[in-house]
Amino acid sequence: MKNAFRTSLLAGLVAASGFAQDAAKPPISFKIQEITTFADWRAYAGGKSFGWGFELGYDFSTPGDVAGIAVYAGYVRSIGDLRKEIYQTPTGSFAPIGTGFNLMGWRLGGDIRFETPIKGLTPYIGLGLVYWKGERMGDSPIFGPKGPILESNAKFAGRVGVEYQITKSWGVSADYNYSEWRANSRDTNMNGSKEASLKISGYNPMNPSWMAISASYRFNWGK
C-alpha cells in the first residue's frame, strides 16, 4: 500500500509537471496523506512506520503576497504491530507487552506560507493543536484489557514543509511534524491502580513525530 501510494504520486507529478499555472489558486484544498512515523511514534507502533491521514485547508494568501496565512483541519492515524518486549507485570512476574497500539489524532492549526521565485513552490511553517487518542488493540499482561489509553487530550504541535503546485488545482507537499502527547510516565494497570514510573520505549513518554507526503486538490466551494 505504501509503495503503491508513492508510485501513483510520482506518476501524477511526472505527467503534470509541465502545466503549472500563474493564475490565482482556489483557496480551498483537500489533501490525502501518507504518514511515515519516527522515534516515539514508530516505537509505540512496534516498529511499524506507516500511517495515513487527510486534511482540509483554506488559504487566505493572494498572488504577490510575500507571506500569507492558511488554516487547516485534519486527521492522522496509525495501526501498530504486536509488541513483544518483556516487562514486569503488576503482580511482579515478567511477561511480554502482548498487544499492539493504535494512535489517532484530530488536528487544527494555521500556517505561514512564503512566496518564492520558483513558480508553484511554497514553503510553509505552522503551529496547531492535536487531540490524540490511543488504544490497546488487545489484552496485555502489563496494562490489562484492551481499550483506550488514559491520556486523550489536546496538545501543541508544529510543522515545517514545502508545497509544489503542479496546476492551478493539483499539487504535492511534504512536511515534518512534531507534537506532544504523553509526558506522564504512569498508566492504569489491570487492577485499576497507577503504575508508577513504568517507562516503556515509545509508550512513556510518547511525543509523536512524523513526515506527511500529500497529494492535494484545490477547488472553489460551490463553483
Image: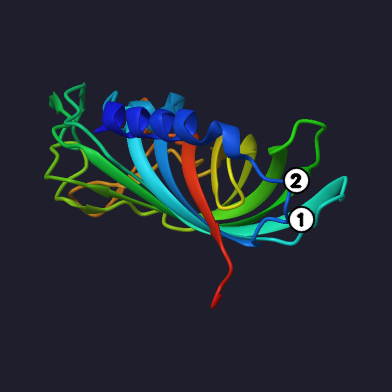
Type of amino acid at the residue the image marks with label 1: Ile
Picture coordinates of residue 145, whole percent (x, y):
14, 50
Numbered circle sitting on residue 4:
none
Type of amino acid at the residue the image marks with label 2: Arg
- What colouring does the structure picture have? rainbow
Q: Secondary structure at mark 2?
A: strand
Task: Name which residue lies at 40% across and 48% down.
Answer: 53
Task: Name which residue lies at 45% across and 36% down.
Answer: 206
Could one spot residue 199 in this view of the protein? no
Mark 1 = which residue?
69
Decide: is 76 above or below 116. below
Residue 132 as seen in the image, left or right of residue 159:
left
Nearest the viewer among 70 and 109 is 70
Picture coordinates of residue 17, whole percent (x, y):
55, 32
Mark 2 = which residue?
113
Marks 1/2: CA–CA distance? 6 Å
Q: Give the class, few, some or many, for how many residues have Cα within 10 Å of label 2's Cα (few <14, many ≥20).
A: many
Decide: is 166 above or below 201. below
Q: Secondary structure at mark 1?
A: strand
Residue 27 as seen in the image, left or right of residue 88:
right
Picture coordinates of residue 210, whole percent (x, y):
48, 33
- In the picture, residue 34 is in which quadrant? top left
Could one spot residue 96 in this view of the protein? yes
Mark 1 and mark 2 residues within 8 Å of each other at the beta carbon? yes
- In the picture, residue 73 is in which quadrant? bottom right
Q: Give the class, few, some or many, for how many residues have Cα within 10 Å of label 1's Cα (few <14, many ≥20).
A: some
Picture coordinates of residue 116, whole percent (x, y):
80, 34
